[in-house]
Amino acid sequence: MTDLSSDLASLRIDRTARGQECSSLWRWLVAGGLLLAIGGAGWWWMTRAVPLAVTMTAVEVRGAGGASGDEAVLNASGYVTARRRATVSSRVTGKVTAVYVDEGMSVSRGQVLARLDDSTAQAALALSEAELASVRTRLIETEVRIREAEVALGRQQSLATERLVAAADVDAATAQVDALRARLEAARQDVLVAERQVGVRRADLDDTVIRAPFSGKAVSKDAQPGEMVSPISAGGGFTRTGICTIVDMTSL
């Protein structure tokens, strides 16, 4: 009987141990599920952060000289404009007597392009030069007279020391010297003014010669001999404002 009880006891199912095994299995399943979820999320984030590779395809465009009829050809028309372009005119109003430039001609800086009638400027220069010569002559005469007056003053002062002349004579000689000295200073100023006037007249004469402001090519000829030119536009339209137009070819 005792042996039978022992056998039956050995065949009895231990539900406590089974419950413990089920609980342990459930924990492993939950842990495995969490690991799979974390791994899947990490894989999704890594694949989302990696940039997609883009395949670039080069397209070759050939000119019209290609042999294939399917090639694309781009035709366009246009023009270039020079950054440096000038209409050459004169500083003064005058009649053109000569033009030395023609359309398409290359010119260099300072080259004479045209000349205006300079008869008036020549006459004004000659008059100012004559005036300069006149004031210089007066200056020389005044210098000579002042030296004579100073000698006379010294003589009068010597005679006055010996009481041979009156004091009034000495005063008169002194006044004469002072007056001549003042006249000498005025003559010197007149010479300076006349010299500057000559410089102005020479500049006016030089303005009748029209020169190229820079090197380039003449693209137009706008005036002919006999026409009037002026730096400002005239109301009647019979006065030219320029001799020619020059373009700096290096600025294209």
Image (cartoon, rainbow, N blue to C red):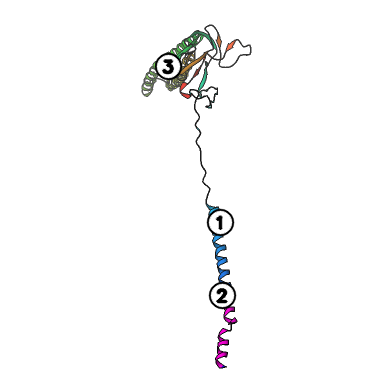
In the image, residue 228 sits, relative to residue 20, either above or below, namely: above
Q: Amino acid at mark 1?
A: Trp
Q: Quadrant of residue 24?
A: bottom right
Q: Amino acid at mark 3?
A: Leu
Work out whether mark 3 precedes mark 2 in sequence or the reverse, and give the earlier one: 2
**Which label belongs to residue 24?**
2
**Which label belongs to residue 139?**
3
- Residue located farthest toward the top when viewing the structure as drawn: 226
10 Å crowding of disc 2: few (<14), some (14-19), many (20+):
few
The Cα atoms of the two marked residues, 1 and 3, are separated by 108 Å
- The segment highlighted magenta reads 2-21
Q: Which mark is nearer the camera, 1 or 3?
A: 1
Callout 3–callout 2 Cβ contact below 8 Å: no
Q: Position of residue 183 (x, y in %)?
A: 46, 19
10 Å crowding of disc 1: few (<14), some (14-19), many (20+):
few
Residue 64 among those drawn in magenta: no
Mark 1, residue position? 44
Specify the quadrant that holds the N terminus: bottom right
The local secondary structure at tag 3 comes to helix
Work out whether mark 2 precedes mark 1 in sequence or the reverse, and give the earlier one: 2
Report the residue at 54% width, 59% height from top.
42
